[in-house]
Image: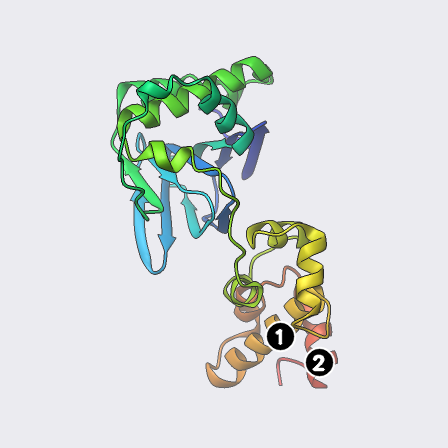
């Protein structure tokens, strides 16, 4: 198959096609919506609380909303990473639930606390995702009707896979608020916008800013820079790491920016 740019992500209103070929990619993923992902090629590792689930080509995983995970998206020596994700937003699930024959809903299904489900290949799920792969290599976008149909197919497939998905998908309670500093201390090294951090901690941007002002005298942006510099300083002093490694590990994208920020904070160059 023709090689694309090193990283490409196409978003079709809740259907995400991700493709890259050269480097491994690590990202924090706070799932504010239920997500069903399928690996077309390469390898994907999902990590939560120190536990890992490895997804191989042709396999599928369901990630419950309001859970934070780290995902590693890895190409192999011979294949690009290619993955497809369906996100089930609450308005779609509410509409689906309202039209569902309530007699079809199984009674007394316990609501499990499990957040990541590895789903064995099934004909309905495999055919659903295979029908989306042509959009990787086409300039033609699926219509809104097609997108909605595919998302509904995904919901039906999950319900047919495991009855446990009934109480999970049709739970419309509001997400809980995640502790802001806990989230930022765990994810300071990732390139997240303030809007994303607010959403991932269960808040609107305005509520996030208001809540953050109660726990810190500096702005969230300044807090993140200070945190990155503190960790970088510790790694350089106590772990004897190289500057060229440290600045990337703590979340700086530009070496010269790191040098300037570090010298302003500590009064000397990080090389010293």
Q: Give me the residue at 48% from left, 28% from top.
A: 93
Image: 48 above or below 126: below
- Give the residue drawn at x 50%, y 34%: 18
Residue 41 placement: quadrant: top left
**Residue 51, percent from left and from top:** 31, 56
Q: Nearer the viewer, residue 129 or 117?
A: 117
Q: Position of residue 2 (x, y in %)?
A: 49, 25
Vertical comparison of 179 with 1: above or below: below
Q: Which residue is mark 1?
A: 229
Name the residue that disc number 2 marks.
Answer: 265
Q: Residue at x 62, y 75 (%)?
A: 229
Q: Is residue 260 above or below residue 139?
A: below
For the residues labelled 1 and 2, the Cα–Cα distance comes to 8 Å
Which quadrant is the C terminus positioned in? bottom right
| Crowd around label 2: few <14 · some 14–19 · many ≥20 (10 Å) | some
The spot of residue 249 in percent (x, y) is 52, 65
Q: Earlier in the sequence, mark 1 or mark 2?
A: 1
Q: Between residue 162 and residue 128, name the one nearer to us.
A: 162
Is there a contact, CB below 8 Å, between mark 1 and mark 2? yes
- Mark 1 residue element: helix
């Amino acid at each position: 198959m023709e090689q694309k740019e090193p990283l490409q992500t196409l978003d079709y209103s809740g259907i995400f096609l991700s493709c890259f070929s050269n480097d491994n990619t690590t990202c924090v993923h706070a799932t504010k919506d239920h997500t069903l992902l399928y690996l077309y090629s390469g390898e994907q590792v999902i990590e939560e609380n120190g536990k890992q689930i490895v997804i191989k080509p042709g396999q599928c995983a369901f990630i419950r909303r309001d859970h934070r995970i780290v995902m590693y998206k890895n190409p192999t020596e011979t294949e690009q990473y290619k993955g497809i994700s369906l996100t089930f937003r609450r308005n779609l699930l509410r509409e689906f639930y309202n039209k569902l024959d309530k007699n079809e809903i199984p009674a007394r299904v316990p609501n499990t606390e499990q957040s990541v489900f590895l789903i064995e290949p099934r004909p309905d799920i495999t055919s659903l995702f295979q029908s989306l792969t042509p959009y990787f290599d086409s300039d033609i976008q699926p219509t809104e009707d097609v997108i909605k149909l595919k998302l509904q197919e995904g919901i039906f497939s999950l319900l047919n896979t495991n009855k446990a998905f009934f109480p999970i998908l049709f739970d419309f309670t509001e997400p809980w608020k995640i502790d802001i500093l806990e989230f930022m201390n765990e994810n300071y090294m990732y390139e997240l916008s303030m809007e994303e951090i607010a959403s991932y901690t269960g808040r609107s941007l305005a509520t996030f800013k208001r809540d953050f002002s109660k726990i810190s005298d500096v702005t969230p942006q300044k807090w993140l820079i200070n945190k990155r510099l503190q960790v970088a300083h510790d790694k350089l002093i106590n772990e004897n790491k190289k500057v060229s490694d440290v600045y990337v590990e703590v979340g700086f994208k530009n070496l010269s920016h790191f040098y300037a920020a570090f010298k302003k904070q500590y009064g000397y160059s990080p090389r010293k």
